[in-house]
Amino acid sequence: MSEIKKGNISIHAQNIMPVIKRWLYSDKDIFIRELVANGCDAVTKYRMAAGETDEDLRVTVTVDKENKELRFEDNGIGMTAEEVDKYINQVAFSSAEEFLKKYQGDAEGGIIGHFGLGFYSAFMPADKVTIDTLSFQEGAAPVRWESEDGMEFAMSEGTRTQRGTTITLHITDEEKEFLDTYRVREVLNRYCGYMAVPIYLVDANEKPEEPKEGEEPKKPEPLNDTHPLWLKAPKDCTEQEYKDCYHKLFNTFEEPLFWIHLNVDYPFNLKGILYFPRIRKDFGGQEGEIKLFNRQVFVADNIKEIIPEFLLLLRGVLDCPDLPLNVSRSFLQNDGYVKKLSAHITKKVADKLNSLMNTERETYQTYWDDIHPFVKYGCLRDEKFYEAVKGSLLLKTTAGEYYTLDEYKARNEGKTDKKIYYTTDPARQAASVKLYTDRGIDVAVLDSVIDISFMQHLELQSEGENVITFARVDADADGLTDTEAEAADLPVEDLTKLFRDAVGDENLTVKAQALKDHDLPLMLLEDEQMRRYREMAALYNQGFSLPEKPEVVLNSACSAIRDLAALEDEELRKLLARQYFDIARMSSRPLEKEELSRFIANSYRIAAKAAEKA
């Protein structure tokens, strides 16, 4: 091919490039992935054509800031003039036009991964693109192709002497960031860090480091891992390899708790590793990250249409070669294959949790404090996940022991009237907790922000003989009566007036009951459901607040309450009533500013009164 061939790509293509540039502006670095992926494909095709070879097959990306060029070179199969004409002049550009027509109306939803742009993406950062290629076929002539606008091209015989292809982009001033080696490395690491062909990055303007005398020259290392761990069989992977992979994928020194290696060939092709990190009980700042790959090419993070929402608290990688990636998110939401894929991932997570629970119970319990918010969130979001793992849900008690729901009910049968008693703050609610633990009743610790919703979910799911009711230790005093205590006839009506005056609430409910702990003057109880409504309203910032409506239970078995009833100093009686009330209040929540100031002032006044009588 000695003469120059010129031509137009397509009369319909004249508006493609500016629209695609604008539409993909936020992902403009995608062209690097596309061109490197093309180079890897060329190498793979050569391997298939040539059979086993010990050649140093590779893709090299060269940053040449001085000449304003970014070059992508492979030593793969190469192209003849006829193939350039077919695959570049016809297929590449017609595919780009078809791509645009099909998806330009879906800019808001986005095209997952933007696969399908291919060679045309080279014009996103460049005002001139050239191809120099030489086919592996014996006797083939080198070919040079160039275009300045993506619309008109010129082809001529090239000068390349080695098999393969070099695509050279003359970078525009507006996109000069891609002449920064650090920036290009960043993109390559993100999109190409696990491609199947070794990828090298070269700075054309940087002099190679001279070896010291007697030392061998340093051999360049590829920047990618061509055999990622998730493509290996689980039996061939060590614990340290899993940890090293986690550190590299997420650039962290933290250790994962455990992991699930997905290796499925049927009914779909799915490889991957899901890691369980430590999950904060309040989810504050908690961000998982699941990277989606297509045949080792990075596509995107956290695609909710494929990955169940609750699994986004995890970290991991999924490689789905059969997934149709150049489609809209709306398609993924309705695609049967995707739904089956999502359901399978959920099942595998449930299977792992159940396996740990059934075969490594002690280890599973050590994980529970870190993973329980995730497990509970999954139960709330996915009914099938809940059904699968409900036997592996644990309650941690104030004694640091772990029981399933059935184990808790069996241990406390006959003591709790089928209730599960819990505390949201074992230290603050210690006095109330003690009333139960002294009677041999286990008290569960439910102190995560998700626990209110989780308890309600369990209550709604339970029925018949398996009905479950949760009650906080300060929600009622059922079963806490000391039946052996001496009967004490307290003037309840008088004490009711006293506490109402001291607290400033004329509707305050006051009753007397002999409690097991004789040193406890009183308890403040609040209806379980009303407190939950109030806490949920505060949690979700509903714009309104429900008032607290505590009920005072005076302990008739406590000498301090009997002494209070008999006290004649009215001022001291009122001070002590308020003080007892505030101390009990601190068992459920901290005192607010004004309450705390009053509490301190009252303490000094009570001390002064005591000094007067001394």
Image (cartoon, rainbow, N blue to C red):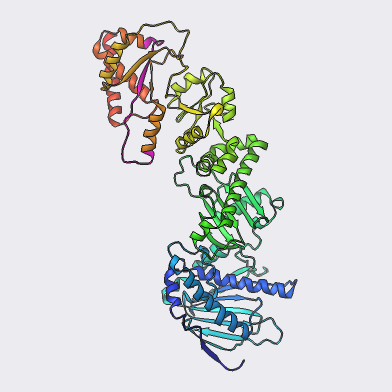
Left or right: where does residue 608 sit relative to residue 73?
left
Q: Quadrant of the C terminus?
A: top left
Q: Going by the picture, which residue comes out furthest to the bottom?
A: 3
Left or right: where does residue 438 sit relative to residue 55?
left
Residue at 39% x, 6% y: name it. 488
Q: Which residues are magenta?
A: 538-560
Q: Quadrant of the N terminus?
A: bottom right
Instruction: Note whether 109 is above or below 55 in the view shown.
Output: above
- Considering depth in this image, is 139 or 532 the residue closer to the camera? 532
Tell me if residue 84 is in the magenta stretch: no
Give residue 556's quadrant in the image: top left
The answer to whether residue 402 is visible is no
**Magenta stretch, overall SS:** loop
Residue 338 position within the rendered picture, expressed as x and y whole percent measured from the top left: 57, 56
Residue at 43% x, 25% y: name it. 429
- Considering depth in this image, is 377 or 564 the residue closer to the camera? 377
Instruction: Note whether 308 is above or below 137 in the view shown.
Output: above
Give residue 77's quadrant in the image: bottom right
Residue 306 position within the rendered picture, expressed as x and y whole percent measured from the top left: 54, 55
